[in-house]
């Protein structure tokens, strides 16, 4: 008999919504005068992805990669079942959702890396357009993921968005994870808050905020190669 079970631990939920906020924050501030926010969101994304990669191996049941990353046959079987009257149901991430998750993590790393490297004069011209292209592609994947989550919720008669807020879904008692793992979630939230409090200038909306104090990236230059020092308020095109 189905009952209310805990599926998503606190850390996974904080990661999810922090990544959503940071990505849209970075995207919307990319071409504004408030470059400091764009860079701050970018660093937050990079830190969140680093956490998620670790959590994919050491986190609770449904957050581990081995629970939801599946091969082509499983993905094809799941997609085919969506056309039937009884589509396959997964308590955690389904195979289609797993594709989006892996893509978003991979693209997030590429977006952040290209943004940081674009501050190097040796790479700036070639990477700015590439960074923008990757960001737009990531945005497209995000919207596909949102539509798929809504459609999956309709097919399986469950609210996937709400479950990622509360952590609860309907399932058998044995399918629940062992607790909400609150210590990891609180530690992640504290790390994000600490980063923003320590690194954000007093007035990030002021022209030149953070100049002379905050360094966007300290690139290790090769001898004889100049690296452009850029502050967190730089008006370069991207991260």
Image (spheres, rainbow, N blue to C red):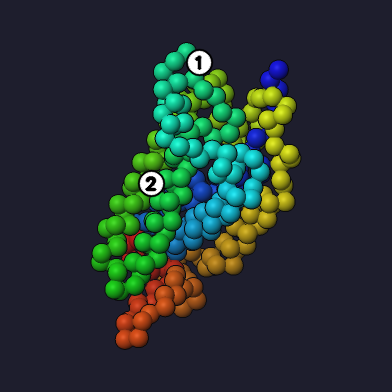
Residue that carries the numbered disc 2 in the rendered image: 138
Corner quadrant of residue 219 = bottom left
Corner quadrant of residue 202 = bottom right
Front-most of residues 87 and 17: 87
Q: Quadrant of the N terminus?
A: top right
Q: CA distance from mark 1 to mark 2?
A: 31 Å
Residue that carries the numbered disc 1 in the rendered image: 86
Can I make out residue 142 in this image?
yes
Q: Quadrant of the C terminus?
A: bottom left
Instruction: Identify whether 140 is placed above or below 122.
Output: above
Q: Position of residue 4 (x, y in %)?
A: 70, 26
Front-most of residues 74 and 51: 74
Instruction: Name the residue rendered at 42%, 59% in the picture.
Output: 112
For this view, does 85 lie left or right of residue 122? Answer: right
Front-most of residues 88 and 39: 88
Of the residues tagged 1 and 2, which is closer to the observer? 1
Q: Position of residue 189 (x, y in %)?
A: 64, 53
SS at mark 1 in the image? loop
Instruction: Name the residue rendered at 36%, 51% in the picture.
Output: 135
Can I make out residue 48 in this image?
no
Graded by Cα atoms within 10 Å as few (under 14), some (14 to 19) or many (20 or more), the crowding at tag 2 reads: many
Front-most of residues 239 and 29: 239
SS at mark 2 in the image? helix
Graded by Cα atoms within 10 Å as few (under 14), some (14 to 19) or many (20 or more), the crowding at tag 1 reads: few
């Amino acid at each position: 008999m189905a009952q209310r079970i805990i599926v998503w631990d606190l850390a996974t939920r904080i990661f999810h919504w922090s990544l959503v906020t940071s990505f849209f924050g970075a995207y919307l501030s990319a071409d504004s005068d408030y470059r400091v926010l764009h860079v701050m969101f970018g660093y937050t994304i990079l830190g969140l992805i680093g956490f998620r990669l670790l959590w994919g191996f050491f986190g609770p049941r449904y957050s581990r990669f081995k629970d939801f990353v599946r091969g082509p046959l499983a993905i094809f079987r799941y997609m085919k079942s969506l056309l039937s009257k009884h589509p396959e149901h997964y308590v955690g991430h389904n195979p289609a959702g797993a594709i989006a998750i892996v893509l978003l993590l991979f693209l997030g790393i590429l977006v952040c890396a290209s943004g940081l490297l674009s501050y190097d004069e040796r790479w700036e011209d070639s990477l700015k357009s590439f960074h923008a292209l990757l960001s737009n592609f990531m945005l497209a994947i995000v919207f596909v993921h949102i539509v798929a989550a809504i459609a999956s919720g309709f097919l399986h008669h469950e609210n996937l968005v709400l479950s990622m807020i509360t952590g609860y879904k309907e399932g058998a008692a044995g399918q629940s994870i062992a607790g909400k793992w609150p210590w990891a979630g609180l530690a992640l939230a504290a790390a994000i808050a600490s980063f923003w409090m320590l690194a954000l200038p007093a007035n990030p909306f002021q022209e030149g905020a953070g100049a002379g104090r905050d360094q966007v990236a300290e690139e290790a230059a090769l001898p004889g190669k100049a690296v452009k020092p850029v502050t967190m308020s730089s008006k370069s095109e991207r991260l």
